[in-house]
Amino acid sequence: MAYHNLHIDDSDNVRTITLNRPDKLNALNRKTLLELQQAIIEAHGDDTVRVIVLTGAGEKAFVAGADIGEIREQSAIEARAFSAMGQNLMSLIQSMDKPVIAAINGFALGGGMELALACHLRIASDNARLGLPEIKLGIMPGFGGTQRLLRLVGTTRALEMSLTGEPITAERAHELGIVNQVVASDELDSAVTGLADQLAAAAPEAVRGILQAINQGADTDLDTGLALETARFALCCATEDMQEGTGAFLEKRKPEFKGR
Ligand code: COA
């Protein structure tokens, strides 16, 4: 499908989806959200795609939030639908069975931070700023930010960031465990590519099992999470990739996983 506000690039088994409205700092308007939803569904259904990278076009921003101009024009009923659409998209991303990496190349504010929080891994450039500034507009996060940030950093930090709206530096986000890694801006691409290639070379069934066990385990009781882990572990052991991985270890060679 042709996109207006996204750029899609495939390299080996890694699909990079670039939010592409740099003149508006890649703000998420309704059209962009719908396109991103479609792009995620396509990536999900494409067996050649093993890892997805989300990033923003331009030098300044990953995504500077939901589109404020559009928010201003909405009735409460439309706002409820807009919030539900954004939340559904973020949940779709989080529940993907392929790793989604956020390459945070600048401002990740409001909906931009919420999008990054829905990804499985986050690498930020050292000039990135992350925050939930909705309070300053007289509104609040509506794409899952209160809930995902709360689960990631706890009530104290989630309340501080949501109530003050003050953005934090990439370094601070790393200290708080919000991002996995901070790199110099000119090293972001290579750091993200390195991680994406590593994950793309892993055994897909093991990747799927880990994503499901940790994502669903985070919101369930221990016994349910452990039962899920056992089921997924058993499934991994039914794959040719398990034979390949264990065989390669014993034969002291590098494994070549085929997704079977
Ligand atoms: N929605 C719509 N447009 C946005 C936007 C958003 N969330 N964020 C930035 N833009 C637009 C600006 O209106 C401007 O458009 P214009 O050139 O047509 O006037 C353009 O993007 C560039 O932004 P600008 O504010 O001029 O850049 P800056 O470098 O001075 O400031 C930010 C950068 C990120 C600090 C600032 O744009 C900002 O605070 N954005 C809003 C962040 C926010 O509140 N997000 C949550 C939304 S719910």
Image: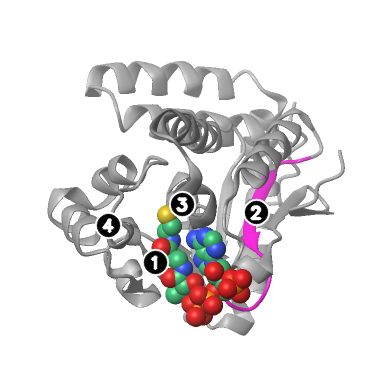
Relative placement, left or right, of 259 versus 54 is: right
**Which residue of the protein is positioned furthest toward the left in this rendering?**
156
The amino acid type, in three-letter code, at marker 2 is Val
- Decide: marks 1, 3 in contact (CB < 8 A)? no
Mark 3 vs ligand 1: CB under 8 Å? yes
Which quarter of the rendered picture does the C terminus lie within?
top right
Q: Earlier in the sequence, mark 4 or mark 3?
A: 3
Q: What's the CA distance linking mark 4 and mark 2?
A: 29 Å
| SS at circle 2 | strand
The answer to whether the residues at label 4 and label 3 have Cβ atoms under 8 Å apart is no
Distance from disc 4 to disc 3, alpha carbons, whole Å, reads 13 Å
Q: Amino acid at mark 3?
A: Gly
**Residue at the spot 38% in from the left edge and 41% down from the top edge:** 142
* Amino acid at the residue labelled 4: Ile
- Which image quadrant for residue 206? top right
Question: Callout 2: 10 Å neighbours few (<14), some, many (20+)?
Answer: many
Q: Which residue is mark 2?
A: 53
Q: Which mark is residue 228?
A: none
Residue identified by numbered label 3: 111
> Circle 4: is it few (<14), some (14-19), or many (20+) Cα within 10 Å?
some
Q: CA distance from mark 2 to mark 3?
A: 17 Å
Residue 82 sits inside the magenta stretch: no
Q: Position of residue 189 (x, y in %)?
A: 66, 71
Question: Which residues make up the magenta segment?
Answer: 49-61
- Is 52 contained in the magenta span? yes
Residue 41: give x, y in percent of width and height: 70, 31
Q: Earlier in the sequence, mark 4 or mark 2?
A: 2
User: Residue 57 versus residue 190: which sits nearer the camera?
Assistant: 57
- Is 161 situated left or right of 78 in this image? left
Q: Nearer the viewer, mark 1 or mark 3?
A: 3
